[in-house]
Amino acid sequence: MTKTASPSQAPEQTAKQTPLSQQQRQADLAPETHNSEQADYASQAQEIARQAQSLTEQTGSPTESTKDHNSSGLMGDSTQDTIDHMRDMESSGRIDMGAFAGEPNHDDNVDKFGKSAKLDGLRGDGT
């Protein structure tokens, strides 16, 4: 048995309705449910894409290191500093674990690496 519209129903109720936008769906909700930073999410994505495509040699990459002129002469531009090392790791996608050599291990599970790696006499659970 097929369902047909009764004569008492308005024609606009039987016609296929267009989906409501997010703003229309949330119009009756409390104002704090609206995130104004995401109101124009479609144009924000396009703007970010345009900015990313507009990188030139003058603007450079965010992972490239730039150094100011050093008048002291103590450190030449060829010396790799911590920031250079971090940006190299970020650009390559590889983590150089040697960058952390000599640093203390602040792992929550201090028992994991044996007695020689413990900084104090406490057990791994803090007691």
Image: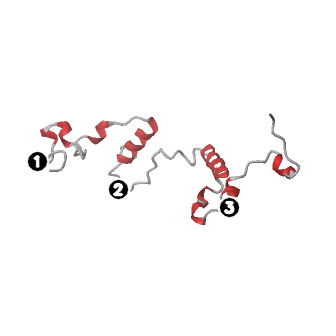
Q: Quadrant of the N terminus?
A: top right
* Residue mark closest to the camera, 2 vs 3: 3
| Disc 2 target residue | 72
Q: Residue at x 60, y 65 (%)?
A: 30
What's the amino acid at mark 2?
Ser
Lateral position of residue 34 relative to residue 93, left or right:
right
Residue 116: x %, y % from top left: 13, 39
Dot 2, crowdedness within 10 Å: few (<14), some or many (≥20)?
few
What's the amino acid at mark 3?
Ala
Q: Residue furthest left?
A: 121
Kindly report the distance in space between the C-alpha atoms of the residues bearing marks 3 and 1.
60 Å
Nearer to us in this view, 73 or 123: 123
Q: Residue furthest right?
A: 7
Contact (Cβ within 8 Å) of mark 2 with mark 1 = no
Q: Residue furthest front?
A: 1
**Under tag 2, what secondary structure?**
loop
* Looking at the image, residue 111 lies above or below residue 32: above
Lateral position of residue 66 relative to residue 127, left or right:
right
